[in-house]
Amino acid sequence: MSIPLHPTSPGHPSSQPAGPHARRFPHLFDAPLRPLFLGAALTAAGAMALWMAYLNGVAPFSRYYGPHWHAHEMLFGYTIAAMGGFLLTAVPNWTDTPPLRGLPVLGLSLLWLAGRVAPFFSGDPGLHGLSPLVVALIDLAFIPALMVAVAIPMLRSGGFLDNVVLPLLAGLFAANLFTHLERLRGLPLGQQGLYLALTLYLFAIAYIGGRVIPSFTQRLAGAHPRVWPLVEKLAPATMLVFMLTHVFVPFTVQDQLAALSVAVVHGVRLWGWWHRSIWREPLIWVLHAGYAWMVLGMFLTAMETSGWLAAGVSAHAFTVGALGMMTLGLMARAALGHTGRPVATLPLIGVAFALLGLAAMARIAATLVPVEHHLHLLMAAGGLWVAAFALFLIRYLPILLGPEGDSDN
């Protein structure tokens, strides 16, 4: 299955003009990636800024999530919005069906936004607050709606049973449900829910990255990536085994062996894709770097299990490094191709990618330094993260809000 990220011809459904029906809505709702990428970037910067304020005793958190709000929003606020925008853009290309426009895009966007806002209004219903059950139902609603929006074109094209996207989204819904069941019923499932979501996103990086990174590298960097059939067969198998061990028996010998197998197989895979010409194009090297962070995170997981590293190091290699760089890189590229603009790195975006890499290094360092330096490095990592997404917003806000192909970039 190929995964083109921009219209391949003038006759492709996603390359057609919006038409008078869609013009009842602002340009923001011409394509799902516009509001969802914008919401993802705003959540990434805003949630991190609030988290930093909380760590310094300035900002309180909602009573619903408490301090776990940060982890939940990075996985089920930021990352799911980035993935949703990507899938709702790519699926019409996969299936040759018209993309969503107008009212359905508005509805999905408001549903996602409601999940971000509702926890801050959690409280006593008698005092005009939202009950915990209502907060949970609002937040849980987005992924099923996204599944429906993805499934309809797949069913029409006959590709429903041949794709991993819907099982992946179903797994993410279950992971989010686990986090809410801990809040609602006191069931000790919250940590498993976060681990499940993280490993599902890592599987998505391996699955989607295995298709787009070699293609983009060849197209933009002029290289000729090497792809080995045996490695391609082992790549999803090793990742599936790691998902099972990391969710059900984390940081055990089984988990250590699974992580090492992923690191070796996917490290070889990445080595086959690499070419020195990738450094000429930030939109390419950021994807290689994100994949490399995933491989490094697997080695760090094995080292944590052996007791050579403190717990938590690998988690931030996965989240800040792998998820952060892959999602920002894909958003930066897809937003250009699907708004009628040349796919080339805009000014400051290469800097944003580099800042995100530095944020991952600083966050890992914060776990390793003496406790008196911990908060300083946390603030440094958070500041670098916020700066990266602020640069993205500066460059992409006119693109995501404006008409197609009309930019001063």
Image: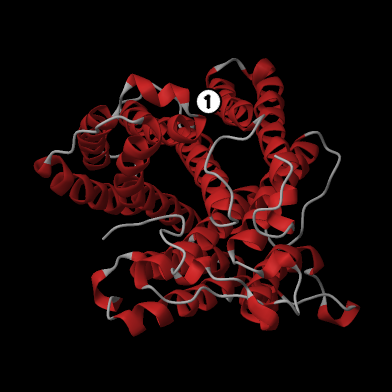
The location of residue 265, given as percent across then percent down, is 20, 35
Q: In the image, what residue occupies the spot 66% across and 21% down?
A: 377
Q: Is residue 258 left or right of residue 97?
A: left
Q: Is residue 250 left or right of residue 107?
A: left
**The N terminus - image quarter:** bottom left
State whether residue 122 is above or below residue 369: below
In-front residue for pair 103/93: 93
Q: In the image, what residue occupies the spot 32% across and 43% down?
A: 215
Q: In the image, what residue occupies the spot 52% across and 25% down?
A: 364
The location of residue 130, given as percent across then percent down, is 78, 76
The location of residue 35, given as percent across then percent down, is 67, 62
Find the residue positioned furthest to the left.
230
Snapshot colouring: secondary structure
Q: Residues within 10 Å of mark 1 (few under 14, many from 20)?
A: many
Q: For residue 80, which quarter of the picture?
A: bottom right
For the residue labelled by badge 1, is the local secondary structure a helix, a strand or a loop?
A: helix
State whether residue 196 is above or below residue 238: below
Pointer 1: what residue?
364
**The C terminus - image quarter:** top right
The location of residue 385, given as percent across then percent down, is 65, 33
Which amino acid type is shown beneath numbered disc 1? Answer: Ile
Q: Is residue 275 visible?
A: yes
Q: Is residue 233 left or right of residue 179?
A: left
Q: Is residue 187 visible?
A: no
